[in-house]
Every structure is written in structure tokens, then in C-alpha cells.
Amino acid sequence: MDAFTTHTGTAVPLQRSNVDTDQIIPAEYLKRITRTGFEDGLFASWRQDPEFVLNQQHHAGATILVAGPDFGTGSSREHAVWALQNYGFKVVISSRFADIFRGNSGKGGLLTAEVRQETVEQLWALIAKDPATEVTVDLEGQQIRAGDLVADFEVDSYVRWRLLEGLDDIGITLQSGDAIAAFEKQRPGFTPTTS
Amino acid sequence: MARTLAEKVWATHVVRHAEGEPDLLYIDLHLVHEVTSPQAFDGLRVTGRGVRRPDLTLATEDHNVPTINIDQPIADPISRAQVDALRANCAEFGVPLYPLGSIEQGIVHVVGPQLGLTQPGMTVVCGDSHTSTHGAFGALAFGIGTSEVEHVLATQTLPLKPFKTMAITVDGELPAGVTAKDLTLAIIAKIGTGGGQGYVLEYRGSAIRGLSMEGRMTLCNMSIEAGARAGMVAPDETTFEYVKGREHAPTGAAWDEAVTYWRTLPSDADAVFDAEVHLDATALSPYVTWGTNPGQGLPLSGSVPSPATASDEVERTAIERALTYMDLVPGTPLREIAIDTVFVGSCTNGRIEDLRTVAEVLRGRQVADSVRMLIVPGSVRVKLQAEAEGLDTVFIDAGADWREAGCSMCLAMNPDKLAPGERSASTSNRNFEGRQGPGGRTHLVSPAVAAATAVVGTLAAPADLPNLV
């Protein structure tokens, strides 16, 4: 995984709450067995509307999504993270993320920056005024900067460390191989096996 | 120190604890299906890693599989490729698999408990958010993403930060005709789709103790719709009775040892929860959703809400958007909403008790001409049990379509879909836009309400039906 320190880009305002993972990527796109190529499925249903914010020319090339509260609710599909990343997004900003989506994002290197709803609305206003507004998301300083706006954001401290270092989770865990083996020796005999 | 059920299960699974880092948690059971696993197996191949404990891993095919003509190859080539990938991966890595056609095939969350693999005090994960279902046994069970699936395959552990705990206490007795599904819809309507975020929910109180294991599974299943990754019910005699004698349940001295341990799991009397919610069971009635998230629900006796009732701008916009999508007018009594399709099934309500409830309502009655009704058992075992009890005859005589096991129209990855604009009453768990097919509209309901709705043609409860002569 590539390390993430600071990202600067333009942003798309997604002024909706409860953006569930079925909207981020509908189930029909989940049949693929690759990790790439999901950009066509991103918000597939909403993108059929020419007025939908992602279809607006002045938001082309944006890399930051600024969404309403409870972003990523619903299913555990990590395809939602891949679709956002495959499309070009590096950061999602919201006042509240669903747990599984946030966890999946951290694994895949998509930064979920949690801010107050007031900050979301200030960002929406800035982007509405000038869609070319550059937004900087500084993971080192846990800060978002755009125009005159400077706001702190929350991110899990362990995820932040892993993103800054670009570390592979499984590699870290395998260093505890002895502890896992020792744990397995003392598991109760009545726990079931599938074989 | 006094501890909650969730804290006890957590504590007995910590492989490694270090300050400022997530705990490394051991996973007792890893369930796998075709949709969220192929990229994880690919990751293992790329890094040259194996599956650490195939004997604690079990795969089945459920999301993609057709519910008719299952003796023929899957028609959709992309679905078929995904199912084939699972078969090849399980063969390569030695993971036990119950494929389409096997007597043990079915929805992963129906199969685990049915085999006795889900037991109190265990940690259970699956690349599916409805893994919370298994919490009904007093297991800590939650959905994970594909990166985590790979992590568990490779290490049988997951690095996790402890959850907060929330007690949801439901006292009193549920009125006749009110089920676990109504209860869960009422809870989600009360705390919202984000209300449980960051928490493990523990359902407590006399109403919960009175639920069957299947009712508890329905309740825990939808914890995720309240934003909680896991929901739990403390194990008791009902739990032990359900587990005993199942294929993978302990036997003899091991059974006694297990039960002795399981009895230590319930939350201590003086345990403190981070949050508490109370509901009065006696005040509940059948619940249905009117909107596009599971928190947008009301008693069936209610009416479509107006955006004017919203407490803030975000909620007002959400209501407006939902009404537009659902094509509903504020003030319309919910009972007047006409339904095109009734779907009975899913990991929420696709078990034998659900089918019995539906059969009880349909016996001697007919599905309305304007309605198509699809009944999809949660597993092959559930299907065979229903057929042994003659329920299939009741369904077919009533004009319903009796299918093979799978996830089916809950998420419409197989050919069972709503057409654009079509409206369903569905016993599944999500009423998101397009969930049951692009442009489809979903009302979440209990099996009893689903069956009555199929007969009447508009949203209805069994109590609304005229008595049979």
C-alpha cells in the first residue's frame, strides 16, 4: 500500500445523508473477481441522471468527496472502497461514517476524514462558490484547509499511523505468529471445527 | 470487575494486547461466500500465503445462485465465473465448501447455526455485514471487508479496537402478531441507522428472553441496519436447547463442559454499558418501512410522513428524497399502499419458523391477482423441512412461487429482481434505493405482514384479514 501523507485536490459535494454501499456500488457490479475496474459502477444508478454532481463537467478530476452524514452504511462490500478509488477519489469527508466502510477504507488506503457537520457545510459552500477550490487534507497534522477554512478532522490513530507508513496489515500480524500459535494451544477442546 | 457479555467474549480471544494498538483477536469461525472472497484468495496467491486454519473456515454459495433450475449451469456467465472461482479457491486452499446442489448449501448465516457451528462465546466473522445474525447465540459476530477476509484466512486473527457496548432492554411481552422483525424495525426507527455506530448491541429484557432462537437471529441480523457491527443475546436454556444435538455441537463430557462455560457468559448484574436504550414491548405493533433506509419505519397503522415533521435540514432532505424515490404522498395511510411483489426469504427471515408463519396466514387463502409472491428458503435444509411439513403445498395452492435456497431478491444479484418502479413488501433487511433491482421500491416487513399483504394486495397485517369460514 502506498503511504498517505498529504493530499491536495478539488472536491465534489455530495449533499445527501445515508449514502449506503448499494448506492456507492450496486450489487450487480460485485460479480467481478478483480480488485480494479469498478469505476463504472460507482454511483451507477445516480450517474444515469445527467444533473448528478459527478456528471458536472466542472467537477471532473476531483479527488475528494464531501458527503452528508452516515456515509457508507449497509453492506460490508469493500468494492465500495475500490470503486471510489478506481474512480480517482483519495479522500472522503463526512461527519459520520459507517464502521465497516471506514474499516475497509483504512485497509485499502482511502482516507475517511471525519469532521463536524458544520465543516461539511462550509466546504459545500466553498465548492459551490468555486468548484476549482483546492482542498488540502493533511494526515500528518489531521487538518483540512480550503480557502479561509482550516478545520481539524478525526481519524483512528492506528489507521493514521498505518496510512502514513503505508504498512500491510497482514505483514504486521504475521510478526505475532508465535503468540497466535500459543493462543491456539489453549483454546477449549469443545470449540467446533468445520471439517 | 463486572463485565458485559461482549467484553467477556472479547477478553477470551485476545491473542496480543499492546498499549495504543488494536487488540489482535482470535477468530473461531470464518464463513466465506463467493462475492467477497475472490480478491482475498488472490491476495494470498500473490503473497505466497496459505489459509492458516481451513478447519475453522467454511464456504457456501448463496449471493449469486439462481433459485430455479439449479441442476443446470448458472446462466449468467459472470455469476458463474464467480461461483467457479470460489470452487477453485476452496479446492486449492483446502477450505470445506457446500456448493449449489449440496444438502448443506444455503445462506451462510442460516447454514452456520443450522450445523451447530455457531455456539455461545465464539468469535464469528464473514465478508458479509449480516454476520451479526450469529450474535443471537451470545457469539461476538460481525461483518468484515475483503481485506479482512484475506487477513483472517492468512492469520485466523484480526486487529480490532474494542467496541463500546449498548444495552437495548425490551421489557414486557410482545403483543400477538408482533414479531422480532417488528421489534428490530422499531429499534432502528428509534435509534436511527447510525445510532449503533461503534457499539456492540446487547438485547436484553423479558421480551428478548421470550424470543425463540430464530427470532433472536432476526433481531441480531439487523443490528447492522442500526449502524452496529454486532448485536448479541446472552445464551440461556433456549440457546442450549437449540444447539444440542446439531452436527457440530459438542457431545458427552464436552457438552457439559461447554454448557458450564456458556453459563458464565451473560453480562454481570452490575456491568456498566456505555449506552442504554429502553423499549416497552407491550406498546409495539407491526412495523413497516416507508422510505429508503431501514430507519424510516412506522407502525403499519401510521401514514406516510411529511418532510415538515423533520427535526433538521438533513432529515428533511432525506425524507423528501425518499418520498420521491418511493413515489409516496405524505398523509397516505400505509395500509393503502399497493404492492406488486412479496418476497419472503433472506438471512433475516428465511428460516423454518418464518415459513410456518407465512403458511399459517396463506392456508386456505389466495395471493391477490395483482401480486406475485416469491418464497425462498434460507437453506436446502429449511426447504426440506418445509416440504416435510407440507408448507410448500400451502404456498403453491395459494399461488405463491416456491423456490430453491439462496439470497435471491434480498439483493438481486441473481435473476430474482424487481422491475423498475415495481414495489415490494419484503422480509429482507434493506430498503435502499435499487436494492432489489434498479428502480425497485422496497417496504421492509415481517413474514406475517408479508403474507397478509400478499393476500390483500396492499400493506396489511394478518389481523386485517377476514376469518376463514
Image (tube, rainbow, N blue to C red):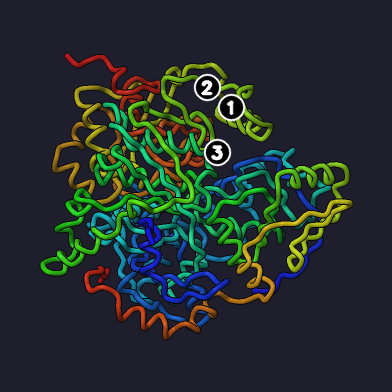
Which of the numbered marks, if any, corresponds to residue B323?
1
Same chain for mark 2 and mark 3? The answer is: yes
**Callout 1, which amino acid?**
Leu
Position in image of residue B263 (x %, y %):
23, 58
Residue carrying label 3: B433
Tell me which numbered mark, 1 or 2, is placed earlier along the sequence. Answer: 2
Residue B464 versus residue A62 in the image, above or below = above
* Count of labels in the image: 3
SS label for mark 1: helix
Label 2 sits on a secondary structure element that is: loop
- Mark 2 sits on what residue? B304
**Residue at point 36%, 45% (across, down):** B203
Mark 3 Cα within 10 Å, few/some/many (few <14, many 20+)? many
* Residue A2 sits above or below residue B37 on the image: below
> Residue B102, position in %: x, y?
25, 59
**What SS does tag 3 mark?**
loop
Residues flagged by tags 1 and 3 on a common chain: yes
User: Would residue B346 be seen by someone viewing this image from the given angle?
Assistant: no
Query: Residue B438, image x and y in percent?
Result: 54, 40
Estimate the spatial distance between the alpha carbons at disc 2 and disc 3, rounded to whole Å: 17 Å
Query: Could you say which quadrant of the image residue A186 lies in?
Result: bottom left
Are tags 1 and 2 found on a single chain?
yes
User: Tags 1 and 2 in contact by the CB under 8 Å rule?
Assistant: yes
Is B251 displayed left or right of A105 in the figure? Answer: left
Image point 74% across, 38% down: which residue?
A51
